Structures are given as structure tokens and as C-alpha cells.
């Protein structure tokens, strides 16, 4: 059991049959981290845009409703 764990530590991240060096593994982790951050920033921007659209629509509907009364 201990041997298997130590072997995993030595080989690092395996993709199919390729063994990445420690430096390459760090680059992959950094790339994945940046992609996750970029995606969350984009999702937040989309939410804000949606909220803004909803606010504009609400204001327009309120004005129309006031005009009818």
C-alpha cells in the first residue's frame, strides 16, 4: 500500500501514457485555475447583464402601467 502511494507521488499526474514533470504539472494546474477563474468572471458578468435587462424591463412596465391608470 505504501509503495503504491509513493509511486503515485513520483509519477505525478498521468494523462493516458504521458507522465508530466513537476513543472509541467504546475503549468497544467495554473492553466486549469485560470480557466475556472475566467469562466466565473464571465458568468458574473452575464448575471449582471441579465439583472440590468430585468431592471429596464421592470421600469418600462411600471411606466406603461402608470400611463394606463
Image (cartoon, helix red, strand yellow):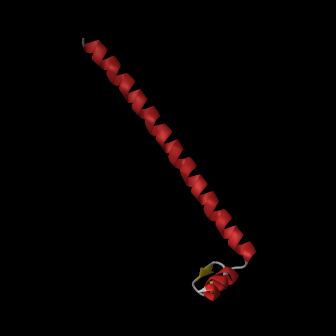
Q: In the shown orientation, is residue 5 left or right of residue 44?
A: right
Residue occupying the far front of the picture: 2
Observer-nearest residue: 13 or 47?
A: 13
Q: In which quadrant of the rendered view does residue 6 lie?
A: bottom right
Residue 40: x, y in percent? 55, 51
Q: Nearer the viewer, residue 65 or 21?
A: 21
Q: Residue at x 42, y 28 (%)?
A: 56
Q: Residue 49: give x, y in percent of width and height.
A: 48, 38
Tell which of 14 and 44 is nearer to you: 14
Please report the residue visible at 70 percent of the width from the left and 83 percent of the height from the top: 10
Which of 28 and 55 lies nearest the eye of the viewer?
28
In the image, taking residue 19 as reference, residue 55 lies left or right, namely: left
Q: Is residue 66 above or below residue 42?
A: above
Q: Is residue 29 above or below residue 57?
A: below
Question: How many numbered marks are there?
Answer: 0
- Quarter holding the C terminus is top left
Residue 60 in the image: state x and y as whole percent.
36, 23
Q: Residue furthest left?
A: 69
Residue for point 62% across, 60% down:
33
Image coordinates of residue 36 in percent, x first then y, are 57, 57
Residue reaching furthest to the top: 69
Classify residue 68 as left or right of residue 14: left
Q: Quadrant of the N terminus?
A: bottom right
Q: Is residue 36 above or below residue 8?
A: above
Say if 49 sits above or below 21 in the image: above
Amino acid at each position: 500500500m505504501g509503495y503504491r502511494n509513493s509511486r503515485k507521488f513520483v509519477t505525478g499526474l498521468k494523462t493516458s501514457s504521458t507522465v508530466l514533470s513537476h513543472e509541467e504539472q504546475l503549468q497544467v494546474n495554473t492553466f486549469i485555475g485560470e480557466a475556472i477563474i475566467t469562466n466565473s468572471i464571465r458568468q458574473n458578468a452575464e448575471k449582471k447583464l441579465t439583472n440590468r435587462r430585468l431592471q429596464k424591463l421592470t421600469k418600462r412596465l411600471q411606466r406603461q402601467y402608470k400611463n394606463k391608470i
